[in-house]
Amino acid sequence: MLGMKGVREQHWAAIPQSRDDMFRPVPRAAGNKWAVEEAARRCEEFVADYREARGRWIAGEREVVFPRGTFLMRELFGGLLRRPSLA
């Protein structure tokens, strides 16, 4: 990790030097290992749910419910979205 100082010191046009640097996971809750792992788990779960719903949609099922966060499916295609939980 570069940290704030490292980011400020790098050239404005700097790019990752390797494929690993370019595609490594990006922390979503810096400084808290457990929060980062939980965010990664939720992201993976969202992608799996979305792929499953999208596959059913492509197969012609129009009553499929997409996971929250798939705004364009509702706005562009009239898809149904999972309601937020109150818990």
Image (spheres, rainbow, N blue to C red):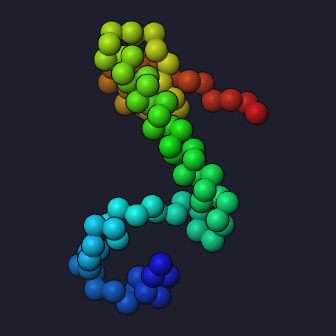
**Which residue is outermost to the left?**
13
Image point (40%, 64%), residue name: 24
Residue 11's place in the image compared with 59, above or below, is below
Image point (45%, 10%), residue name: 63
Image point (50%, 82%), residue name: 3
Image point (47%, 34%), residue name: 48
Residue 87's place in the image compared with 21, above or below, is above
Q: Is residue 12 left or right of residue 68?
A: left
Q: Which of 12 and 53 is in front in this view?
A: 53
Q: Which of 82 and 40 is in front in this view?
A: 40
Q: Nearer the viewer, residue 7 or 31?
A: 31
Q: In this view, does 5 lie to the left or right of 19?
A: right
Residue 56 placement (x, y as % from top left): 39, 16
Residue 61 placement (x, y as % from top left): 39, 9
In this orientation, does residue 57 appear? yes
Residue 87 placement (x, y as % from top left): 76, 33
Residue 62 placement (x, y as % from top left): 39, 10
Residue 38's place in the image compared with 52, above or below, is below
